[in-house]
Image (cartoon, rainbow, N blue to C red):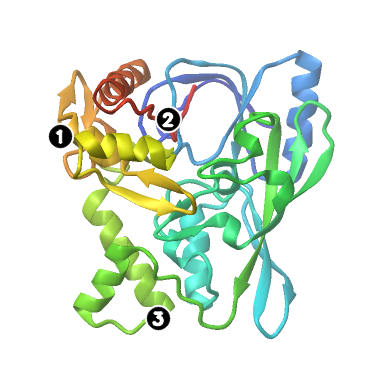
């Protein structure tokens, strides 16, 4: 086990915040997980699991051991006439997996192309975009209990998936190291074109509905709205879109008839970006950070912002939205 001390994490989080890990280990094989758990027990260390660093905001140095997940690999474990079941190691870059499925013409996650981060983070967040969530193709996952070392299999039901949510963001938060996830993908054509802007692009460009064209079109839409973390520090959407009851929606519509919302079963999802924009935060800079000028849901680091500055910006935005709409924004990003 190669243990590093006082390790800079500036290149391991997409906000490009310069915080340090007291101890650091790169997990490249499953044996490293077991060795790390033994080290944590023996030294009575605190610990933190780090994947692609795309959904976190570091506001301080991390005490104890940081386990950086670099487990990689895709394995076919089942197949029938309609579908293929794969086991994917949790440290693989999510976008590499999506590109692999598109190349193999396996349907199910092509709408989730360009979402940053690792495969292991995907079920924790129940990532979703353009009408698709990972739970739609999810079968189960394997994870190590970091306190006991026990390896446990979690079914879809066990994971308690919700909107950008799972059991791993709640009662099991930071208690497990996910080693691999199992997905079931369609071999037969199965496009999901329920997202209006995606439909509009296909109609405008008269594109045939292929898995390649869905991937390319989603990339074009995402690139037009979201900054590249390699060029400007960010973690994509910082806040969740609020989901509210109809009676609350009706109250808001009385004062804001142009409110953007979408029906979701018996509830209604509001556009958090629209709410933030109405509070005049879009494109606004505060110290070394600010709100992206093309998408108000995205907070950005202009180069030297500290994590605490970005957190303070988020708090100011939340306060303004609460005062104007009486809506509580909730962070999609994990704040450390």
**Badge 3 or badge 1: first in the primary sequence:** 3
> Mark 1 — residue?
283
Badge 2 marks a residue whose secondary structure is: loop
The residues tagged by marks 3 and 1 sit, at their Cα atoms, a distance apart of 36 Å
Asked if residue 76 shows in the view, the reply is yes
Q: Which element is circle 1 on? A: loop
Which residue position holds label 2? 330
In the image, taking residue 40 as reference, residue 129 lies left or right, namely left
In depth, the one of 289 and 52 nearer the eye is: 289
Rendered location of residue 71, percent (x, y) = 64, 48
Which residue is at the front of the view, 240 or 327?
Answer: 327
Q: CA distance from mark 2 to mark 1?
A: 20 Å
Is 263 rendered above or below residue 256? below
Q: Nearer the viewer, mark 2 or mark 1?
A: 2
Q: Are marks 3 and 2 in contact (CB under 8 Å)?
A: no
x and y percentages locating residue 31 in the rendered image? 77, 41
Q: Which mark is residue 210?
A: 3
Q: Give the Cα distance between marks 3 and 2.
A: 36 Å
Q: Secondary structure at mark 3?
A: loop
Please report the residue visible at 24 percent of the width from the left and 83 percent of the height from the top: 206
Left or right: 165 in relation to 99: right
């Amino acid at each position: 086990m190669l243990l590093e001390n006082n390790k800079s994490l500036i290149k391991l989080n997409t906000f490009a915040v310069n915080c340090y890990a007291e101890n650091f280990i790169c997990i490249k094989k499953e044996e490293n997980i077991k060795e790390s758990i033994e080290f944590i027990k023996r030294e009575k260390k605190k610990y933190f699991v780090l994947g692609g660093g795309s959904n976190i905001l570091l506001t301080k140095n991390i005490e104890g051991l940081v386990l950086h997940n670099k487990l990689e690999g895709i394995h076919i474990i089942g197949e029938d006439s309609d579908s293929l079941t794969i086991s994917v190691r949790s440290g693989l870059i999510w976008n590499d997996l999506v590109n692999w499925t598109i190349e193999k013409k396996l349907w199910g996650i092509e709408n989730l192309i360009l979402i940053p981060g690792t495969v292991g983070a995907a079920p924790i967040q129940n990532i979703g975009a353009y009408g698709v969530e990972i739970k739609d193709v999810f079968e189960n996952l394997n994870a190590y209990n970091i306190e006991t070392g026990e390896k446990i299999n979690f079914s879809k039901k066990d994971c308690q998936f919700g909107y950008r949510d799972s059991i791993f963001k709640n009662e099991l938060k930071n208690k497990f190291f996910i080693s691999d996830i199992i997905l079931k993908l369609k071999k037969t054509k199965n496009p999901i074109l329920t997202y209006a802007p995606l439909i509009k692009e296909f109609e405008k460009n008269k594109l045939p509905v292929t898995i390649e064209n869905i991937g390319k079109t989603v990339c074009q839409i995402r690139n037009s709205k979201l900054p590249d973390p390699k060029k400007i520090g960010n973690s994509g959407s910082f806040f969740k879109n609020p989901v509210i009851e109809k009676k609350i929606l009706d109250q808001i519509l009385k004062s804001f008839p142009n409110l953007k919302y979408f029906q979701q079963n018996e509830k209604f999802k509001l556009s958090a970006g629209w709410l933030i924009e109405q509070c005049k935060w879009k494109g606004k800079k505060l110290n070394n950070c600010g709100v992206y000028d093309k998408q108000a849901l995205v907070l950005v680091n202009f180069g030297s912002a500290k994590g605490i500055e970005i957190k303070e910006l988020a708090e100011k935005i939340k306060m303004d939205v609460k005062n104007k709409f009486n809506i509580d924004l909730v962070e999609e990003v994990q704040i450390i």
